[in-house]
Image (tube, grey):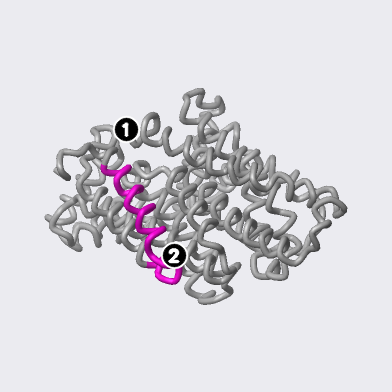
Amino acid sequence: MFFGLTAIECFVVIIAIYTVLFWIIPKKHVWFVFSVVVILLAVLAFNMEPNPTDDLTRYYEHLDYLRERGYDGLLYLIETNNNNWQTYRVCAYYFYFISLFPDNHYMSAVTIFIVYGLMFLVFYKASRKFGVAKWCLYLGTMFFLATYWYYDTASGVRNGLAFAVIIACAYYHLVEKKNIFLCILGYAAACFTHSAGIMLVALIILALLTCNVKGNAINVLLVFGLAGGSALIQFLATITDNSFIQSVAGKAEVNAAAESLDSGTMFYVNLATYVFVAAVIAYVSWYINRSELYGDIKKFYKFSLIIMFFMLGTLYSGLVFVRFARWIIPVIGSLLFMTGMQFQSESIRKMPASYAYDGPFGETLRLKTRSIFVLAFFGYTSVHLWYLCTGSSLNWMHF
């Protein structure tokens, strides 16, 4: 299959094809390059076989049941609350939609197509809106491809799908300021796909409420946000029998029980990516906050900061931290790098030659270390891409 290549080798070939096409095709047609890589990644997902311990193996059983029983089977699974489908009905209907296809492998393929399609749509819209240079766009998208956990998205389905929908809606809502009603519907659909989406939507609401609040007090409080939030959910679960609250409370109990950090390499790689993206935000924040276009990205930037501080409070719960690190942090790092570096380039064009020496210390330091920063960004992307192909869950992927 695929000329005798392994699944990981196919993934590397897709990245190589993306790189070649990106630099051959003019920037105004970059949508074509994005479309090609999304389709190729979806085809790869279609051909992969799940491992016995993957969620996807269990999902195949649900698809077989729905394909045999049809819509009546879906109603029965909802009525019996299979997989909490009385609460997460969007997830139930997504499974039913996939069951209409003749092959179970469409589940991974469609999921990857939606998730990567939405993320590349965000990058494309941002590149158009902020006039991102081609090299910035390439490095940003490569960082995303290198740090986003492809196999976990294809085999886990629900987490990646819910987070991708929320991030895409957040971008349109907070940056483009378009289709707000559809964005709200997207938030709701994601929350009724997987419980993890509830936390992310709550952070979007918090960003909207605190966007104009100055100071770090709210950020300090967010460090302890998860513990307080879990306690609140547990309290609500004791005074109500609402299925939605009960489902979230069940998830919170699982997270609270796992108080010790995962000491595996994968967790530390996620932690390293978190620290690196924090450094990226610290570097580009000067230009984002002073750009003439700051008003357009202000709320998304605030949302990103809230996520970063919130994640500090999730360190005691490895599961929550890892989910955000694998499906949220790569997008934030990519998007803020692209826009921040473009804002810096525009700032450099406007300033006199002597500004790099007699300007404010913070900006002169950034100007003098610009090449080092870009090299570090490229280096971390390359190292993580190597890890993705040699040490991450991608190694579990096979035909």
- Is residue 210 visible from the viewing direction of this image? no
Q: Is residue 227 above or below residue 192?
A: above
Q: Residue reaching furthest right?
A: 358
Q: Is residue 333 visible to the viewer in this orientation of the structure? A: yes
In this rendering, position of residue 361 left or right of residue 223: right
**Is the C terminus in the top left, top right, bottom left or bottom right quadrant?**
top left
Residue under numbered circle 1: 395
Point 17% across, 51% down: residue: 65
In the image, 127: left or right of 357? left
Location of residue 31 by image quarter: bottom left
x and y percentages locating residue 390 in the rendered image:
37, 30
On the image, the x and y values in percent for residue 204 come to 60, 59
Which residue is most to the front? Answer: 353
Of the pair 144 and 113, the residue shown nearer to us: 144
Where is mark 2, residue-wise? 121
Write down the region rendered in magenta: 10-31
In the shown orientation, is residue 323 left or right of residue 294?
Answer: left
Earlier in the chain: of badge 1 and badge 2, it is: 2
List x then y, in percent, for residue 78: 30, 56
Closer to the camera in the image, 265 or 365: 365
Name the spot of residue 128 as percent of width and height, x first.
52, 70
Magenta stretch encompasses residue 90: no
Q: Secondary structure at mark 1?
A: helix
Using the image, determine if residue 73 lies above or below residue 295. above
